[in-house]
Amino acid sequence: MGKTAPVLVITCAAIAREVNEIKKLGQWTQMDLQAITADLHSRPEKIPAAVAEKIDQARDQYEHIFVAYGDCGTSGELDRVLEDRGVKRLPGAHCYDFLAGRETYEQMQESEPGTFYLTDFLAQHFQRLVIEILGIDRHPELLQMYFGNYTRLVYLAQTDSEELTALARTAAEQLGLRFERVFTGMGEMVPELDAAMQAAIWRS
């Protein structure tokens, strides 16, 4: 089978919009995207197998493959899967890490460990991905069990959206947490994806 494009980026759906925007900014017509549902964040043990399946299916079609994921709670298993296949990923434990920037994220964590984070995607889908998946809508008593040790919600904003900010603020109120907003833009994703693309183009 002939190869269709030099680079495939396999991304979590939670950051697919951002990856696509960076693709447009870079005018990388040689990049294709494939997204994996963000619902797997509630079952992180399934992420490595889902990513591995995407890679294995794409081997004959793409010269280079890059993964836009953090470790995302896989306890290093995703990295083991990627190492076996010679594929690299975005650095960091999760998307908060590379969206906020590692240094900024570490500072926020050190200043207040009991922090719950939202991105644009999570703010938009908070009810389904947090309240419904955790069962809080059906069992309100679970709210304290899951969030009793949190003190604030930080919305890491990729865009200046009043609508998303309002949704994030409502989420904080629903969880009983102090609200803060930090504008991140695309964070460290831009240089990391650019480096991956330049390396792929150089090797092509």
Image (cartoon, rainbow, N blue to C red):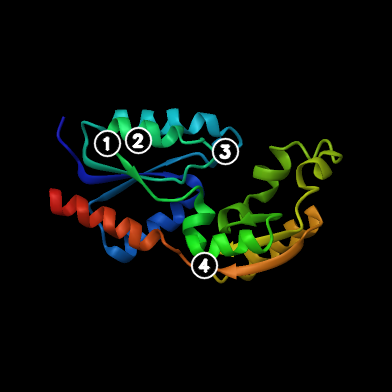
Residue at the location (48% across, 33% down)? 47
Q: Residue 80: percent from the left, percent from the top?
A: 38, 32
Q: Is residue 113 left or right of residue 91?
A: right
Circle 4 residue: 184
The crowding category of the residue bearing disc 2, from other C-alpha atoms within 10 Å (few below 14, some 14 to 19, many at least 20), is some
The first of marks 3 and 4 along the sequence is 3
Q: Nearer the viewer, mark 3 or mark 2?
A: 2
CA distance for labels 3 and 4: 23 Å
How crowded is the residue under tag 3: few (<14 C-alpha within 10 Å), some, or many (20+)? some
Amino acid type shown at disc 3: Asp
Name the residue nearer the viewer: 95 or 57. 95
- Mark 3 in CB contact with mark 2 (< 8 angstroms): no
Q: Which residue is most to the right?
A: 141
- Disc 4 to disc 2: CB gap under 8 Å: no
Q: Which mark is residue 39?
A: 3
Which residue occupies 68% across, 56% down?
Answer: 113
Query: Is 21 above or below relative to 84?
Result: below
Residue tagged by mark 1?
86
Please tell me which residue lies in front, 133 or 113. Answer: 113
Q: Secondary structure at mark 2?
A: helix
Measured Cα–Cα span from mark 1 to mark 4: 30 Å
In the rendered image, residue 160, in percent from the top left (x then y), is placed at 56, 71
Q: CA distance from mark 3 to mark 2?
A: 21 Å
Q: Amino acid at mark 2?
A: Leu
